[in-house]
């Protein structure tokens, strides 16, 4: 089926374009044309102003719509999460499993594999965050599940076929060669919840470490004589850094420092969203403990941050309004750059012929999502 969209300002992944429309066919973008050149015989939807941009890609989503993936690792949960985050502009996500039992991790991985095999819209892969963490930097992860990876666990991870997998671990918890084995199997290994020294991070990068999960949070900071995880992340030009820009996890000055230090294209927005996103619920259960939303912050009984309560359009808005990032760069950080991390930037992250028709139509004044498309399939919000 062929359809055209016009009436909104286009952001094609590189720049804003006025008075243009997009033609889609069979789930892909077929053409981007001046509005007056759109064929008369193609059904055209006139959008009410706003911006039409590549759909957002969130590589760290723990829950949404009142459900948490760890608590119910099933395809039904995934569908609920997709719908909740789609209303915030996210058209592709990596559902995220945090440190838990082997049974939960296997069930979650199996659910994502089935979702991808069955083409459940919006699921691009799986993020496994833990359990190979340093207890000193565990954050809200349950310490009873944390341990160094065994050879058998490495083999299981390498056997996860048919899906993109990000694995967040603490490099100092691994044995020499384990990160290389994971990387050679196609797993995107990132450092997080780590107390590693700079030298340990550099060794991990040489083995195939590709990025850093929620930069600054739950990792050894940059100091004068020890760069730690943060310093090594900012110093390395080739790795990606996810960052939570929700106004609570990272100070705007620190966000600007990271943006200045890293080459263009290597900083990506993530939400680290929990069950409350897209739900009226103000609390949920994590490891049997109640996590409450207070003043926009999700905290446990100890007062520790436990994920975020934002969707991706919120992250774009806060990046613009609080950090001072230009809108076009914020949009790239929410779409094109995470597509690059996932090695999907030739299919996602731009409005160009041949790219998948994953799009978000939103208002940048009221910061509201009006419409989304996943592979050309429309949903109004």
Image (cartoon, rainbow, N blue to C red):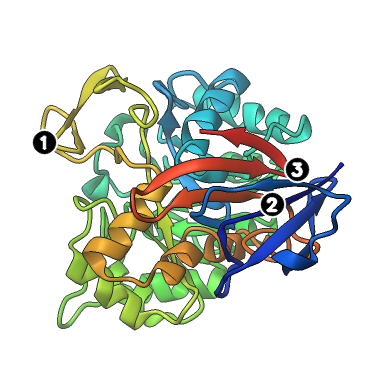
Q: Nearer the viewer, residue 137 or 324?
A: 324
Separation of marks 2 and 3 at Cα, in angstroms? 33 Å
Separation of marks 2 and 1 at Cα, in angstroms? 47 Å
Q: Residue shown at 21%/53% (left/top)?
A: 247
Classify the position of the N terminus by image quarter: top right
Residue to which mark 2 is pinned:
5
Q: Position of residue 106 (x, y in %)?
A: 59, 28
Quick check: 66 above or below 274?
above
**Which is in the foreground here, disc 2 or disc 3?**
2
Residue 93 can be seen in this image: no
Q: Residue shown at 38%/57% (left/top)?
A: 316
Outermost residue toward the left? 302
Residue to which mark 3 is pinned:
162
Residue to which mark 1 is pinned:
303
Circle 1 — which element?
Answer: loop
First in residue order: circle 2 vs circle 3? 2
């Amino acid at each position: 089926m062929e359809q055209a969209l016009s009436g909104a300002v286009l952001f094609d992944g590189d720049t804003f374009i006025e008075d243009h429309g997009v033609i889609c066919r069979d789930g892909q973008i077929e053409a981007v044309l001046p509005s007056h050149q759109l064929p008369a015989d193609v059904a055209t939807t006139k959008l009410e102003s706003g911006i039409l941009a590549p759909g957002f890609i969130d590589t760290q989503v723990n829950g949404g719509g009142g459900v948490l993936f760890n608590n119910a690792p099933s395809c039904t949960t995934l569908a609920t999460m997709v719908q909740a985050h789609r209303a915030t502009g996210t058209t592709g996500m990596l559902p995220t499993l945090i440190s838990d039992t082997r049974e939960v991790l296997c069930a979650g991985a199996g659910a994502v594999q089935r979702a991808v095999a069955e083409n459940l819209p919006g699921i691009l892969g799986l993020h496994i965050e833990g359990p190979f963490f340093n207890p000193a930097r565990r954050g809200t992860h349950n310490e009873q599940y944390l341990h160094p990876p065994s050879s058998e666990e490495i083999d299981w991870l390498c056997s996860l076929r048919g899906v993109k997998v990000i694995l967040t671990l603490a490099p100092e918890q691994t044995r020499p060669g384990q990160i290389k084995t994971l990387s050679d199997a196609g797993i995107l290994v990132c450092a997080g919840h780590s107390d590693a020294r700079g030298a340990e991070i550099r060794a991990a990068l040489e083995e195939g470490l590709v990025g850093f999960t929620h930069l600054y949070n739950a990792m050894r900071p940059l100091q004068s004589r020890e760069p730690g995880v943060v310093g090594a992340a900012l110093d390395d030009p080739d790795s990606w850094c996810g960052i939570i820009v929700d106004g609570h996890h990272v100070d705007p000055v620190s966000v600007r420092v990271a943006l200045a230090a890293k080459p263009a294209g290597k900083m990506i927005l993530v939400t680290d969203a929990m069950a409350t996103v897209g739900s009226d619920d103000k609390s949920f259960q994590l490891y049997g403990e109640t996590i409450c939303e207070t003043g926009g912050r999700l905290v446990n009984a100890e007062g520790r941050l436990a994920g975020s309560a934002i969707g991706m359009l919120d992250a774009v808005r806060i990046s613009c309004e609080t950090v001072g990032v230009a809108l076009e760069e914020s949009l790239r950080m929410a779409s094109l750059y995470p597509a690059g991390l996932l090695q999907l930037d030739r299919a996602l992250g731009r409005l160009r012929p041949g790219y998948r028709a994953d799009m978000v139509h939103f208002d940048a004044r009221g910061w509201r999502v009006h419409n989304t498309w996943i592979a050309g399939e429309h949903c109004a919000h």
